Amino acid sequence: MGVITDEARSWAGREYPTFDFLVTATDIAKFAHGTGESNPIHFDKEAAIAAGYDDVVAPTLFPYVVRMHASALVPTDQLEPDGSPTVDVPPLPTRRAMAGETAIEFGERVTAGDVITVRKRLADMYEKEGRSGPLVFVEMEFTFTNQHGAMVARESFTRIYR
Amino acid sequence: MTTLPETGTEVPIQLRVPTALDLFMFSASTWLLHRIHYDTPFTVEHDGHPGLLIHGPLQGVYLVQTAESWLGDTAKISSISYRHLAPAYLGDQLECGGIVTENDGAGIDLDLWVRKSDGTITTTGKARLDKR
């Protein structure tokens, strides 16, 4: 046991620089098409206004788009050979990652023209013995707010390294 | 005033069969750059998978869409959690469904899942939807 070094452990509690994402109607349409959405409120401003929004509205899980850009919108030399970003990962003996569990609560909907700020924190890190060796669990916390300071989403995401 | 489905009601199953184009569009639109979702030689030869992987977060979207398209404007999703239990690969037919575990008058709790045609559950989740 003990694959988490003191250096890696010192990452627990780390807060990352905030990231601002200006949400355009194009970003919303891309994500909507990329997930098979057909509701016109994601594509057509008039339809969105008729449904009570100010502008085209993003699909529910759009905050995921924001946090992926916060991690991976970097020069290619800051990406692993497999395409995943290196900058936000503590120094672990393995970088072979699996998505673990995510829990999201939603606040204000995201619409075109919003600026979404994501705050990111490495909340916890721990290891368990798996069937084929140690597993390291890295728990990230994300808080998404819009330009009015309103909470858009809060997410806790656990990534597993093996 | 509409009422939400009672405890024990099954969520109608939605079949999702993402194509390579769907996988690429999800990667591109989210900026999820991991090659196992669009680079077949890398995925098979380097990582030892039988084919391209269907993104876990895309399956999370499927769970949200399964609940939202069922309930329409009668409810609004306030939270969801999900975890991935097994890989899903390009070509897999994914059935998305669930059940109402609680209806407390103000909203409902759902258990949701994504299942391959061989019965393997790839993703499970729990969602809360509040009455509008």
Image: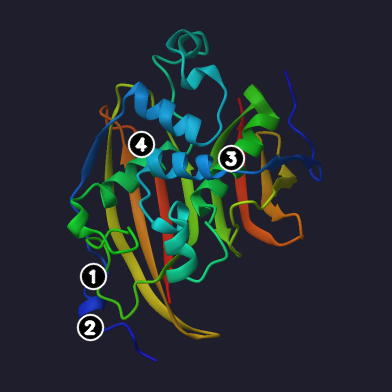
Mark whose residue sits in front, 2 or 4: 2
Q: Residue at x 77, y 34 (%)?
A: B5
Answer with left or right where residue A47 lies relative to residue A140.
Answer: right
- Label 1: chain letter: A
Residue B101 visible in the picture: no
Question: Which mark sits nearer the N-terminus, 2 or 4?
Answer: 2
Query: Dot 4: few (<14), some (14–19), or many (≥20) neighbours within 10 Å?
Result: some
Q: Residue at x 21, y 54 (%)?
A: A76
- Label 2: chain letter: A
Q: Residue at x 75, y 55 (%)?
A: B117
Quadrant that contains the N terminus of chain A: bottom left
Mark whose residue sits in front, 1 or 4: 1
The residue pinned by badge 2 equals A6
Q: Position of residue A65 (x, y in %)?
A: 38, 41
Q: Nearer the viewer, residue B10 or A86?
A: A86
SS of the residue under disc 2:
helix
Answer with left or right where residue A52 lies relative to residue A71.
Answer: right
Q: Is label 1 on the same chain as label 3?
A: no
Q: Position of residue A29 (x, y in %)?
A: 43, 26
SS of the residue under disc 1:
loop
Amino acid at circle 2: Asp
Is there CB contact under 8 Å for labels 3 and 4? Answer: no
Q: Residue at x 35, y 55 (%)?
A: A141
The residue pinned by badge 3 equals B64
Residue B114 visible in the picture: yes
SS of the residue under disc 3:
helix
